[in-house]
Image (spheres, rainbow, N blue to C red):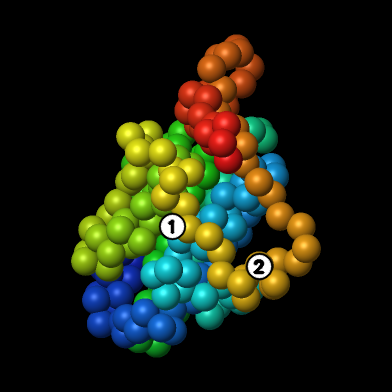
Amino acid sequence: MELNTIERDDIESAAESAVVPSAASRKVFVKTYGCQMNVYDSQRMTDALAADGYVATDAIGEADLVLLNTCHIREKAAEKVYSELGRIREMKAERAQAGREMLIGVAGCVAQAEGAEIIRRSPAVDLVIGPQTYHRLPDVLARVRGGEKIVETDYAIEDKFEHLPQPKRAEIIRRGVTAFLTVQEGCDKFCTFCVVPYTRGSEVSRPVAQ
């Protein structure tokens, strides 16, 4: 359900006066849906945001940035995302009324498939970003903080594997002794029943030397 005009105006007015946290104190909450690839991607987004001053938090109410890393494989996956966005929208409004910023981003395969439709249906969303452009997150967030609504679902020309930062030692320790490693992603087969080529793009892989 879309916000009515009064609700939009209230949120936007409060957001304009919200205190923007300093780079050293920003917190990000990432909710991951779906497959192991999404778990990997959520970790890479957290790593990219660490370079921008964000610290991961498990408490959504404390977050200055909330990212939903979505899956498009399951039936009605998009509707589950919109339902979750409705709940987060209320948190954003409460934080704005308290003078605290909360940015909302939708990532993953639903973001790639739905694009600008997500912001149309959920105006509280500040950014929509597809799986191939996570390395651009700090730049995208800078534009969002400048007042733009961003939909970043184009397939990047540059090789994202060359632009993903390494996690900090403290983050490696926090995650434990195991980690996911992507060697190849995407698909060129375009099977009738499968959305992967449309949401993950064509096959890309790390260089053999790696």
Residue 115: x, y in percent? 39, 39
Give the spatial CA distance, label 2 vs label 1: 24 Å
Secondary structure, mark 2, is helix
Give the mark nearer the N terminus: 2 vs 1.
1
Q: 191 or 1: which is nearer to us?
A: 191
User: Is label 2 or label 1 in front?
Assistant: 2
Residue 122: x, y in percent? 40, 53
Secondary structure, mark 1, is strand
Check the picture and name the quadrant holding the C terminus.
top right
Q: 136 or 113: which is nearer to us?
A: 136
Image-quadrant location for residue 194: top right
Q: Is residue 106 above or below residue 52?
A: above
Name the residue at 62% across, 37% down.
183
Q: Is residue 65 above or below residue 115?
A: below
Label 1 environment density (alpha carbons within 10 Å; few <14, some 14–19, many ≥20): many
Residue 87: x, y in percent? 54, 64
Q: Is residue 34 left or right of residue 54?
A: right
Q: Is residue 143 above or below residue 200?
A: below
**Can you identify the residue that label 1 sits on?**
105
Name the residue at 35% across, 38% down.
158
**Can you identify the residue that label 2 sits on?**
172
Image-quadrant location for residue 156: top left
Q: 103 or 163: which is nearer to us?
A: 163
Name the residue at 24% across, 76% down.
16
Q: How many marks?
A: 2
Q: Is residue 207 left or right of residue 19?
A: right
| Identity of the residue furthest to the front in this view | 209
